[in-house]
Amino acid sequence: MRFLPTLLVVLGLAASRDLGAQNDALSRAMHDELTRSMESLHLDTLPRPYFIAYRIDEIDQVDVAATHSSVVHSTRTHGRLLTVEVRVGDYAFDNTNFFAVPTAGGGLLRGFGGLAELPLDDDYDAFRRQLWLATDAAYKGAVELYSHKRASRAVPRSATDIPDFSRDDVTTTTDSVATPAPTLSDAVALARRLSAVLEGLPEIEQSEVSVNVLTLRTLYLNSEGTSFARSLPTSALRVEAATRAADGMLLGEAFTTRAASLTALPPADSLSSRIRALVSRLGQERSAVRADAYHGPILFEGEAAAQLFGNIIGSKLIAARRPVSDNPAFDQFLARRDNPFLDEMGARILPKFLSATDNPTLQTYAGQFVGGFRIDDDGVRTRETLVVDHGILKTLLSTRVPVRGVPRSSGNCRGGEPVVSTLIVTSDSGLSKEGLRQRLLALIAARGVPYGIIVRHIGDARITARDNPFAVFAAMEMERGGSPAFPASEVVRVYPDGHEEPIRGATVSDISTGSFRDLVAVSHGRSVYTVPTGPNEIPLDLPGFIRFHAALEYASTYVVPDLLFDEGSVKASSAQTSPLPVVPPPWAN
Amino acid sequence: MSARRWMVGTTVFLLGASARSGQTAPDTPMLQAMRNELARNMTVLRQQPVTPYFIGYEVREDHSVTIRSTFGAITQTQERRGRALVVDLRVGTPALDNTHALRGDVPDLSDFMNFGGDFVEVPIDDDTAALKVVLWTETDREYRRATRRLASVRANAEVSVQAEDTSPDFSVEPAEQHVDTVIPLVVDTTAWEAKLRSYTAPFRRYADIYDADATLDAGVDTRWYVNSEGATIRTSQPIYRLYLSAFSKAADGMELPRYESFMAFSLEGLPDDSTVLKAVNRMITDLHALQAAPIVDPYTGPAILSGRASAVFFHEVFGHRIEGHRQKQEDEGQTFKRAVNQAVLPAGFSVYSDPTLTRLGATDLAGSYQYDDEGVAAQRVTVVQAGILKNFLMSRSPIEGFSHSNGHGRSQIGLTPVARQSNLIVQAAVRRSRAQLKGMLLAEIKRQHKPFGLLFDDIEGGFTITGRGIPNAFAVLPIMVYRVFPDGREQLVRGVDLVGTPLTVFSRILAADDQMAVFNGLCEAESGLVPVSAVSPGLLIAQVEVQKKPKAVVGPPILPAPGP
């Protein structure tokens, strides 16, 4: 979706209240058990905790899917998940950032190192009980790991070592809006209505509309005195459809739109139009020629630019500390997963005319919901962070777990990890849409290739996964090899005279982190794209714990101009192409 | 392929009547749509070079409510409704089709990525147009898969030696017609939340009980089945389960669990509050007694298994070995393959498997059904008559000497049905009283010059291994075990599991009591989880063996429980 900047909605800080003073049973239970644990929880010969934190995430969720105005599944889930963080040692050296094979003999009392389901009833005694057991389990795990880490020779000890945990301001914050409980019937009605748009379309072989309404309420308290109450409502509507080309290639397209609530989603009419546009694109793809192998200039327009940037650069702009391990084989495995930007502070990673700023405080950007937050999961107040300044990497988005060059939190902790919130790429010199196209044509001519490539959407439709289950593994393998490849769902060849020819089955590759340094040009306008890792990704058949934890995954947004690379590749698709079904479709009578 | 088969879950007795609807109703739009689409696909596919000889469609709906409480407070309330479609399509001939087992080390990748079963969701509304689209695409997918696999099967048959069992891959069975009314799921969640809170609140008083949960699983399982032979079936079965669990810890770190569970086909069939609360009190008493109980070392000697322990024992040790397909698979142990019409149990014992039985006394039986997962009518099967093996449990996969299904082809949705147990009933011709059986145990202890015998009262489940290459052992996992001294005194002990090997143990069964008990549970095997029951009297066995239970090493909590 294109726009010209900018209308930003920034959240102001609400008046904060000391949670300890609240009469709320849960807050009191957290306060009482935390205080007792800090005072008394320790085994004689072993160190006490120097830090304890409780985070309670209450998930209230409705999830519905419909096809052809019929409901396929509908689920209402409500639960509370407690995460306990216990640290022993001190800020410089504690039980974390260390990986050891879990010791056997934990049993039922161990839990997942401090995870538990809490009651939904407001029952002080029941809360205290679960907090007590979970804290005990977390402490025992922490103290055992700490001893192991101290004894391990793999852990370096010197004055220049990075601390395990950074210090931060004590804050008390309320970021809560009253949110009504999601209703199944509203979600069902919307899913039915929109899925009806895809009914009676003979060329659409499969389709699904899913609606997910989630309210995530979080309470947090730590032993330094920081506390917060936060409420993050999100609604997501996702539409997927697939069609089959004459040679049997299954082509899928999808889009997701998000808002703070169901009623804040775009009106049904506008969504219906969007669905019809998706169908029309699928129609174009069906009749498109198959992609050939290609090497040359590639222009990423619109959402494709944001998707590409997010995947290759954006999602890696995080300060993810690599844990130390005492197992050499595992150490090697961890090394392979290193973030490429971890030691690149001061290096140029983008062209000089590009900068990038992360801003978690934004609730919307140019009218699109991006779902910001004012306080992160560590209780750190969020803020704007300049990550890339005229091409130079200045810092990485961080939590209270420092890495070299990033000693303090930037307020980007969600689910215990650093995340990109809304990353906005700005340019000193952007071209108009037409201007950028002309640049592309010039590159084509200079390169001497018969045509260039414009990518408008990178495929993320899971709807085709059943047809090609190996695609997931193939993608993972290519990613590990350092050269990610993306199936592109909306791709055209552009010829020197300017005319466009759609192609299908293209996989874009050979665009690496290094390719971005050599970006030829970008557009003036920018697109907004939220990476679909939000709540509606949860498989419904997972057990409660894991499903709740998945609901806590955060969706990152990228605001990115169109991107012109002078060198990239397109591979012909490796998707299996089954012949068309032998039996004609049921509507074809 | 050898694998462990698990049975978990416990239950005891139930009060109240179970309700099952079984009236025949007129044909339904869903069934009509399924039949029409099946016929349409079959007509076109029959013109292909490789033609299907059989197509079956099954749609299963699971509509369920789960509510859980912990220590007197509600921790989860969830409602879910979804329908899944499975297509069974066979190419080749009934003598040799695409489902034929690939022998040797040939990797079978046809089920790659089908973790947890291969099925697709279909709308939960009765929208026949949408349903037909899914039926059509899935039939196409299955047709291609079956055709590819048939090619592998044919090649594999060429290169392998002649199989021991040359029976066909698919049997001939009558096509059944039966349509039940769909039963709606109605649960008063507010009332049940209050009940569940009250069931776990009593545990709060005890600081040494570290978990206490009560879960209500209420659901209706509705199925629609049609096949190319003309079968048309709809069944609708409500199932309600109430599980209680709690655990404590001994001073040496051993975790001490205690479970109770109840199952019924109606909400009214679940026990009333006072019955459940009595069970809760028993759990609390037992957990405290277990904390103080001494550990018993590995031991062999005479033992009594209570009815429930015997039921699990028979399910694991005997039941899995009379599942028909195991007699055909060449990597299976095939314990009883050649034992038809021979003595396999002591002469006084008979065993039958009866899915048509819905209750025994006041207890609903979890393994009951009207039609199996291949559309074959459920049948009572006499497995053992006066100690002599007569029959195996059969699906539509014939084995040497048994060419028909007896309605025991079962599976979890998305997995291929194989012969599985239903309600396994063990009967003894001679039944002693409990006191007499104990008297016989004491006599046996003296005769063997043992310091004590054992009594296994309550168990949590068990498992067994039936493949070749590794010992075909079994384990029954007891919770309440007593040492019985020669003077008759009983002492609660902990820390051991009951183990053994089948043929040896069967030859040591001496006597049975007159207390039939039901164990309702879930059995996990190669076709997934299916509900089953086993019913047995208590048994006196001349020689059992016990080995040590696994033990956690994490100690009890450091701080005392928070004050009230």
Image: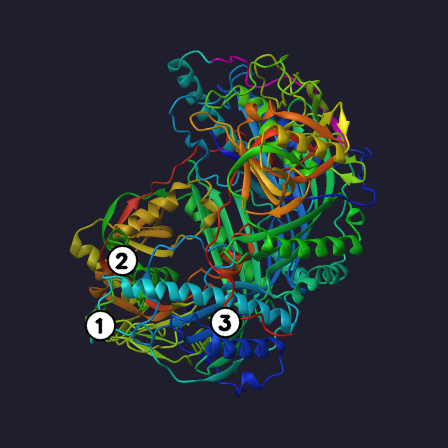
**Residue A370, horizontal then vertical, whole percent:** 46, 70
Q: Nearer the viewer, mark 2 or mark 1?
A: 2
- Helix, strand or loop for disc 1: loop
Q: Amino acid at mark 3?
A: Arg
Q: Left or right: B499 with respect to A395?
A: right
Quick one: which residue is furthest to the bottom in this view? A15
The chain ID associated with circle 1 is: A
As displayed, is residue A139 above or below residue B281? below
Q: Which mark is residue A326?
A: 2
Q: Rounded to the nearest whole Å, what is the CA distance between mark 2 and mark 3?
A: 30 Å
Q: Which mark is residue A89?
A: none
Query: Does the magenta-highlighted stretch encompass residue A18?
Result: no
Secondary structure of residue under mark 3: strand
User: Can the viewer see residue A309?
Assistant: no
Q: Amino acid at mark 1?
A: Met
> Which quadrant is the C terminus of chain A positioned in?
top right
Expressed as whole percent of the image width and height from the top left, the position of residue A288 reads 38, 44
| Chain of the residue under the numbered disc 3 shown in the image | A
